[in-house]
Image (cartoon, rainbow, N blue to C red):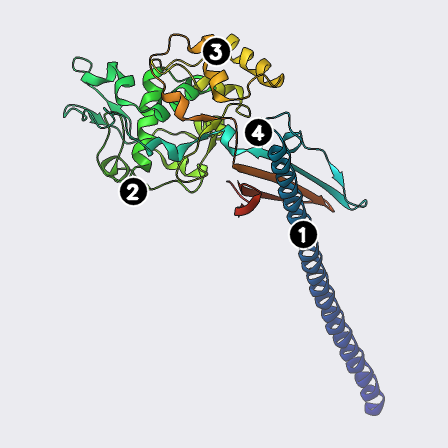
Amino acid sequence: MSCHRSKYRQRGAALVIALLVFALAAALMVGVQRDFSLQLQRSTNTFFAEQGWAFLIGAEELGILALSFDSKLDSQNEVKVDSLNEAWAQPPQPYPLDEIGVLIGALYDLQGRFNLNGLVESQGAGGRSGTTPANNATEADGTLQSEPDNPPAASGQPRARLNEQQKILVRLMLAIPELELDQIEAVRLVERITDFIDADSERRLDGAENEIYLSGDFPYRPANRALASVSELRAVAGMTPERYTLLAPFLSVWPKEGSDINVLTASPQVLAALGRDDSLSPLSANEVARFLEMREADMIPDTQTFLDDPAFANSEGSGLANIITVQSQWFLLDARVEIADRERRLYSVLHREGSRIAVVHRTEGEL
């Protein structure tokens, strides 16, 4: 009787052991399968990322080739210009990649934008005139509030204390209606941007220096150097995310020494900012439309033709003549590749000097 029971007990133990072995094996298989799936996914992502990067570098080489070809054409022409009518400036076209994805790339003229680093290239005669009155209060966001009965004496004549580049940026802000800035607000923001870039710690009349930035909830210091990215504007006192989003597409920081504005590639907003020397108001919509028609018909072969337009007939000075051009040396490649529902993007800053073209900056984030 006891022998019979012992056999049943042994069979039960064997079944339990078999179930434990099966459970362990199943757990191991699940773990192995999971690790294999993760490793396969990592390998796939790495492969597509490397493949995408190779295509983006190929797009960069095509951009360099297009600019090199344009240089050769310019060397054969009497009139050397860089305009939106040329091959390199045509709108982007999707390029299929053997049914695995698509590549899209476009070249843009960075000299068709306003270079922020030009703000401190040369100071106007009154660029440092005036200080903030002692009875001005500084709010936490850096906004200077003047006493109603004692406004800053020089605030009524901002044109006298701004250099030509600063005037252009004021007009650019006023030429973007979505910014909803009046002239006083635009001048204040321009002076704060200039203070953020210049090397000293002396605050302009409506500017902002260390005392503003160090008094906030998250204190920091202004850059006090040439900007390396347009995105650094986010740190300027008074620059809201909404303002930055609207303004950034018209701005550049290349080269760091500042650059002339190409009137043949500038956007309508930047063209409007090239107003009369004696005014902070942008050009009218009709004047901008006339310039757009002229350059589309290749009727602006040089800067003098641009300045001879009736829009500048009553201009007092000639400061604009030293800031505009019809040739460009700095370009931006914006390339995007889509492979297997994965997207990768590349921004490349290209510098052309004669027939030589160099890649001076690459980024996959904000420029």
Height in image: 29 above or below 207? below
Cβ–Cβ below 8 Å for labels 1 and 2? no
Where residue 322 sits: x, y (%)? 39, 26
**What distance separates the C-alpha of mark 2 from that of mark 4?**
39 Å
Looking at the image, tell me whether mark 3 or mark 4 is earlier in sequence order: 4
Q: Amino acid at mark 4?
A: Asp
Image coords of residue 306 (percent x, y): 49, 17
Q: Which residue is mark 3?
A: 309
The residue identified by callout 1 is 54
In the rendered image, which residue does mark 2 sit on?
221
Front in this rendered view, residue 318 or 266: 318
Q: Which residue is mark 4?
A: 82
Q: Position of residue 2 (x, y in %)?
A: 81, 90
Crowdedness of circle 2 by 10 Å Cα count: few (<14), some, many (20+)? Answer: few
Answer with mark 4 or mark 1, whichever residue precedes in sequence.
1
Q: Residue at x 41, y 29 (%)?
A: 240
Give neighbour class at mark 1: few <14, some 14-19, many 20+ (Cα, 10 Å): few
Above-or-below relation of 252 to 28: above
Q: CA distance from mark 1 to mark 2?
A: 39 Å
